[in-house]
Amino acid sequence: MTRRDFLWSGAAGVALLAGTAAMLRMGGPPDARAAETFEVTKTEAEWRAILSDAAFNVLRKKGTEYPGTSPLLNEHRKGIFACAGCELPVYSSETKFDSGTGWPSFWQEIPKAVGTTQDRSLGMTRTEVHCRRCGGHLGHVFDDGPPPTGLRHCINGVALTFKPATA
């Protein structure tokens, strides 16, 4: 390998890493979900007016928050996690577990709360989870979770709100 080949391969690697990081921060390419219709619809300006920049990036642009940054990661009270876009209850604290990934994780959604689509961004196939009412991107589901479902819903905390149970 010549010095030029070495430098070129190093530059290509840096470009690949930078592009992957940008996609993680900014969201993946558009998918079939864009053609679906949802009960709650808003213009981009309306979504921007009610969501923080971080929540807008995740919910509306399919972005990803940095691992370990969500206060909901360490939320252990009993209650309900709802979609930050439309307040639909999507996960119960009863199904939350510590996956060690840096994102809030659940082994099951509330029935009829979420939809899924195939996500082929980042050169792999994953199952994306979105709010069934507003279509907001929540995260992804993987088959490496605990019993009884064996699933791990890896969810962006910024896409959720938490409502503690009343005594």
Image: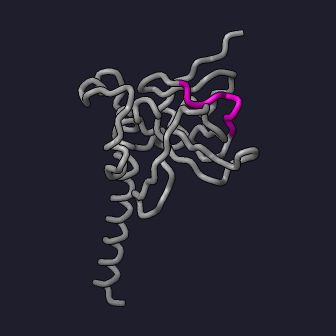
Q: Is residue 26 magenta?
A: no
Residue at position x 63%, y 17% in the image: 164
Residue at position x 59%, y 52% in the image: 142
Residue 46's place in the image compared with 22, above or below, is above
Q: Point out residue 94 in the picture as x, y percentages from the top left corner.
A: 71, 30
Residue 157's place in the image compared with 153, above or below, is above
> Quick check: 159 left or right of 12?
right
Name the foreground residue: 72 vs 3.
72
Q: Quadrant of the N terminus?
A: bottom left
Name the foreground residue: 66 vs 30.
30
When asked about the image quadrant of residue 109, the answer is: top right
Q: Residue furthest top?
A: 167
Q: Is residue 94 magenta?
A: yes
Residue at position x 65%, y 21% in the image: 79
Q: Residue furthest right?
A: 147
When asked about the image quadrant of residue 11, the answer is: bottom left
> Quick check: 97 left or right of 65?
right
Residue at position x 42%, y 58% in the image: 120
Q: Which residues are magenta?
A: 89-97
Q: Point out residue 140 in the picture as x, y percentages from the top left corner.
A: 52, 47
Q: Point out residue 19 in the picture as x, y percentages from the top left corner.
A: 33, 59
Q: Main secondary structure of the magenta part?
A: strand
Q: Quadrant of the C terminus?
A: top right
